Image (cartoon, rainbow, N blue to C red):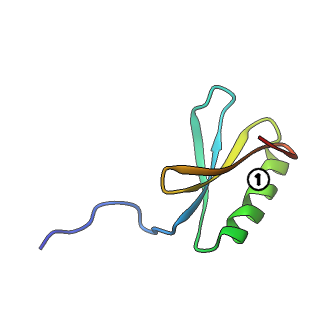
Amino acid sequence: MAWRMGRIFDHPYRVVRYSNRGDMIDELAQCVHFDLARACQREAARIWPDDEVTVQHGIRIMVKMRGTEQI
């Protein structure tokens, strides 16, 4: 029997924080619903205004924010 190796939780939307150089810093949240992921993103962008915070669906970046501005 083959076991799937990966993350403990595997939800479709991820909220990820990147440095100014474009390096991934943290995966902040995984969410089932897009609206919840956006709420997490807005709060993370408020906490870390100098970093880029994205909502991703798989490898696709759905929304980027830095501070209060959508990129």
Which amino acid, mark 1?
Ala
> How many numbered badges does the structure rendering display?
1
Per the image, the residue denoted by label 1 is: 44
Q: Position of residue 12 (x, y in %)?
A: 52, 66
**Quarter location, residue 20:** top right
Q: Residue furthest right?
A: 68
Q: Where is residue 24 in the image (x, y as percent from the top left)?
A: 57, 39
Quadrant showing the N terminus: bottom left
Location of residue 13 with respect to 70 vertically, above or below: below
**Residue shown at the point (61%, 31%) measured from the top left:** 22
Quadrant showing the C terminus: top right
Location of residue 52 with respect to 33 vertically, above or below: above
Q: Where is residue 40 in the image (x, y as percent from the top left)?
A: 73, 62
**Residue shown at the point (59%, 47%) measured from the top left:** 26
**Residue shown at the point (51%, 69%) measured from the top left:** 11
**Residue shown at the point (42%, 67%) measured from the top left:** 8
Q: Where is residue 31 in the image (x, y as percent from the top left)?
A: 60, 69
As rendered, which of 28 and 56 lies closer to the eye? 56
Location of residue 63 with respect to 51 vertically, above or below: below
Q: Residue furthest left?
A: 1
Q: How many other residues sit within 10 Å of disc 1, few (<14), some (14-19) or many (≥20)?
A: many
Location of residue 59 with respect to 52 vertically, above or below: below
Q: Is residue 6 left or right of residue 10?
A: left
- Secondary structure at badge 1 equals helix
